[in-house]
Structure formats: C-alpha cells, structure tokens
Amino acid sequence: MFGINGGEMIVLLLLALFIIGPERLPGYADQLKDLVKAAKRYASGAKTELKETFGPEIDDVDWRKYDPRQYDPRTIVREALAEADAPEPDPEELRRREVTVARESEEERRAFEDHLERKRTPAHAPEPELEPLPEQDHDAPQQLAAVGAAPGPRVTPYDGEAT
C-alpha cells in the first residue's frame, strides 16, 4: 500500500501517536471513524444509484469477463492463430444460417411495424392533405405588411443549441 512495508507503517503510526498526543488522539480517531463511514455511505449510494439507473439487468452481467487481469497476450495470440488455422465452414451450412437470420429479422421487422401501428395516436398520425389556397390578389403583400404578418410560408424557428 503506497509503497510502505509493515515496519515503516508501524514507525509512522508511532510518530503520529507522538505528534498528536494522548489528549487529542480520541478526537482524531472519531474523525477517522466518521471519514470511513462517510466513504462507505458514498460508495453504497453510488452502487444503489447505479442499480437504479441500469435496472435489474445489471445483475445479469458477468463482470469477471471484463476483468483486465484475465487477459494474457499469449493466450489471445494463440487463440487468433488457432482461428486462422481452423477449417473453412461448410458453404451449405452458412447459407442455411443466412436464410434463418434473414427470416428472423424480417419477422422482427414486421412485429415492430405492427407494434408501431397499434401505438399510433392522433398526435402521431400522418397529417391530412390540405386543399390548395385560393388565388390571392396582387395587393395581398401590402395588406399583410400593414397588419405585421410576413408574406410567404410560415417557417418554424430552429435553434441549433436547443436540446
């Protein structure tokens, strides 16, 4: 821990005891206890917040699989070379797999479209086609300018910084 061995740790503890003194030692011990409790509460709160954020699926993750200590470069190279030496898969089997995957993805796409169709609300329904406006006279821009409206189509303002 911090490059300190057991003997050095004992010397540091004795030095701290000598500097702090017996009358202030209980106060510092209480402060250390409070610090450890606060750190534990912080870690527990972070863990709880993480579980709330990711939901119950986080318990299903095999975290040992992502441990960097398990990766040995020699093993990785050996496995890569073994894959390169592996025989080619049967083309008929590959074609069967592709057909199965294509069929499953088509079924999933249809199911998703059906789901969207059922969930569609009037707010999300396609807009009805509008009838064309009647022919306007040539004095219309001046009349619009008089009431403060700009001629032409209404454009919704766009703010690129808005979220």
Image (tube, helix red, strand yellow):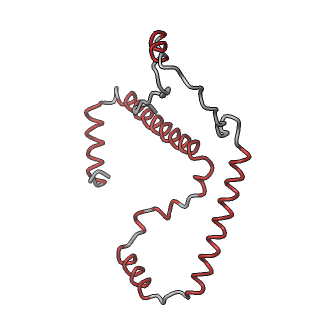
Residue sitting at 40 percent across and 69 percent down? 71
Q: Is residue 149 above or below residue 112?
A: above
- Looking at the picture, how far across and down is residue 102, in whole percent? 62, 70
Vertical order, 63 against 104 (above or below): above
Q: Name the one closer to the observer, 35 or 71.
A: 71
- Which quadrant holds residue 83? bottom left
Q: Position of residue 139 (x, y in %)?
A: 47, 16
Of residues 25 and 154, the one nearer the viewer is 154
Furthest-right residue in this view: 118
Q: Residue at coordinates 40% horizontally, 32% vertically from top-left?
A: 161
Choose top left, top right, bottom left or bottom right for residue 94: bottom right
Give the residue at the far top of this rendering: 146
Q: Which of the two residues, 22 or 152, is positioned nearer the viewer here?
A: 152
Numbered-mark total: 0
* Residue 126 picture location, percent across and down: 65, 40
**Residue 144 percent location from the top left of the image:** 48, 15
Considering only vertical position in the picture, is 20 above or below 112? above
- Residue at 64% x, 32% y is 131
> Residue 127 falls in which quadrant of the image?
top right
In the drawing, does residue 27 fall left or right of residue 6? right
Lateral position of residue 161 relative to residue 107, left or right: left
